[in-house]
Image: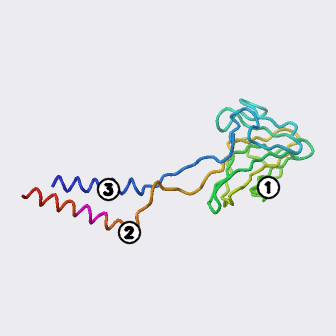
Amino acid sequence: MRLKTLLVVVALAVWFSVSAPKTFAQNLLTNGSFETGDFTGWNTGGNFEDTEVVSGAFDQYTGAEDGNFYVVMGPVGSDGTMGQTFSDHAGTQYTFSFWFAAVGDNPSDFSAYWDGTSVLSLTNPTTGGVWTQYSFNETGTGSDSISFSFRDDPAFMALDNVVVSSSSTSTTGTTPEPSSLILLGTGVLGLGGFARRKLIK
């Protein structure tokens, strides 16, 4: 009886080690949380005045959403821009997400883009000054880009923890086909029968 129990445990262990899915959430962006303390990895342009990486309390914001640093954005009169281009896998689903905070300054605007196509466009946005996450599902083409444009004449908006990661789970190894599982089960049972006969002798 103990041998049969052992064989069942071994079979279950093999099954879970082969087929258990593991989720990977590697950020494809460089310095997505601005923890270098600057804009390393980012392309910046447009009216970039009054836009900087800060830590701790700044204006109406008490600190970063993730880590120690975040961006405050306050160009006056026209938009500033920042973005990145990255390599990914064509046809794979990705999640593009970021944390944003604003207090409804007028005039102000904030937009986010995937490959130059707007996924979010806000005029005089407000989150009550509280960090709020925005998330979008996109399909990779092999080489893609994300970018932001922003303006805040009276004061500042804030941005942190920008991430592009695969939104699917992947597996280690190959998941057995049903026929393979049947063969595995048959082999384990056969091994049990062989062991039992050997013990009887």
Secondary structure, mark 1, is strand
Q: Is residue 125 left or right of residue 200?
A: right
- Residue 68 sits in quarter: top right
- Cβ atoms under marks 3 and 2 closer than 8 Å: no
Q: CA distance from mark 3 to mark 2?
A: 15 Å
Please, which colouring scheme is shown? rainbow
Quick one: label 3 or label 2, which is nearer the N terminus? 3
What residue span does the magenta drawing correspond to? 184-189
Task: Give me the residue at 68% from left, 58% from top.
Answer: 142
Circle 3: element type:
helix
Q: Tell me the amino acid under the disc marked 3.
A: Leu
Query: Marks 3 and 1: which is nearer the front?
Result: 3
Are the two marked residues, 2 and 1, in contact with CB atoms closer than 8 angstroms? no
* Prevailing secondary structure class for the magenta stretch in the rendered image: helix
Q: Amino acid at mark 1?
A: Ser
Q: Is residue 12 magenta?
A: no
Which residue lies under the disc numbered 1?
121
Task: Give me the residue at 33% from left, 53% from top.
Answer: 13
N-term-proximal mark, 2 vs 1: 1
C-alpha gap between disc 2 and disc 1:
48 Å
Q: Tag 2, which secondary structure? A: helix
The residue labelled by disc 2 is 178
Residue 169 position, x and y percent, is 53, 56
**Residue under label 3:** 12
